[in-house]
Image: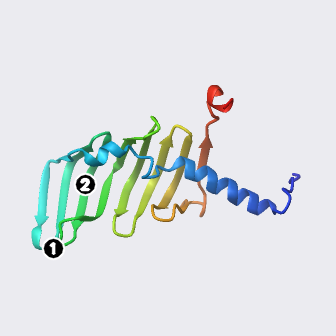
Amino acid sequence: MRHRVVEGCRPKAVLARLFLSSSIVLVANPVTALEADRSQPMDIQADSLETEINEGKATLQGNVRITQGSLKVASARADVQQNSDREVTRAVLEGAPATLGQDLDDGGRVDARARVIDYDVAAGVIVLTGAVEIDQPRGTLRGERITYNLNTGQLTGGGTDAPGRVSLRINPKPAAAAAD
């Protein structure tokens, strides 16, 4: 196999740049998530709720459904932690799979599925593990573990059966958009 060398770049550097730029397109950036959703009320339903008010913990179990505007979350279990100001600091969703979906400001939609979705609000990090699949209009990202740092935009992913293994599908731009 022959590699075409881009002036000033080694083939590995070109692949790294391609992966990074492609992956960023595939992950729901909170800036592009439907802004209007943040001002909507949040509705939560579950078969049961257990709270430890003094410790700021809540566990929802059984057919957990969370909606806020276009944001839709479904899981078998949700563990939520709050700080002393009652602000959510962490949410861990578990399911077979746990799912979340949200409309984007540009008119598209992002849908994610994994056995565990762990959102550390304080750190600004989302970790999806177990049969992860993230679908967006521009493509699909799959792997066993995907980590997205909302603060830095860094995305890392890999698999358990073959370390570092992920699968990306990048859809072509629609013909009308490609002509722009």
Q: Quadrant of the C terminus?
A: top right
Q: Is residue 102 above or below residue 125?
A: above
Q: Residue at x 55, y 60 (%)?
A: 157
Q: Is residue 5 left or right of residue 160?
A: right
- Determine the residue located farthest toward the top in the rendered image: 176
Q: Is residue 118 left or right of residue 141?
A: left
Q: Amino acid at mark 2?
A: Arg
Q: Which mark is residue 64?
A: none
Which quarter of the figure has residue 158?
bottom right
Location of mark 1 (residue): 55
> Residue 8 at x, y = what percent?
84, 63
Q: Which mark is residue 77?
A: 2
Q: Is residue 6 left or right of residue 163?
A: right
**Mark 2, secondary structure of its residue:** strand
Q: Amino acid at mark 1?
A: Glu
Which quarter of the figure has residue 58?
bottom left
> Residue 126 at x, y = what percent?
41, 60
What is the CA distance from the residue labelled 1 to the residue labelled 2? 19 Å
Q: Is residue 124 above or below residue 167?
A: below
> Residue 154 at x, y = what percent?
54, 63
Q: How many marks?
A: 2
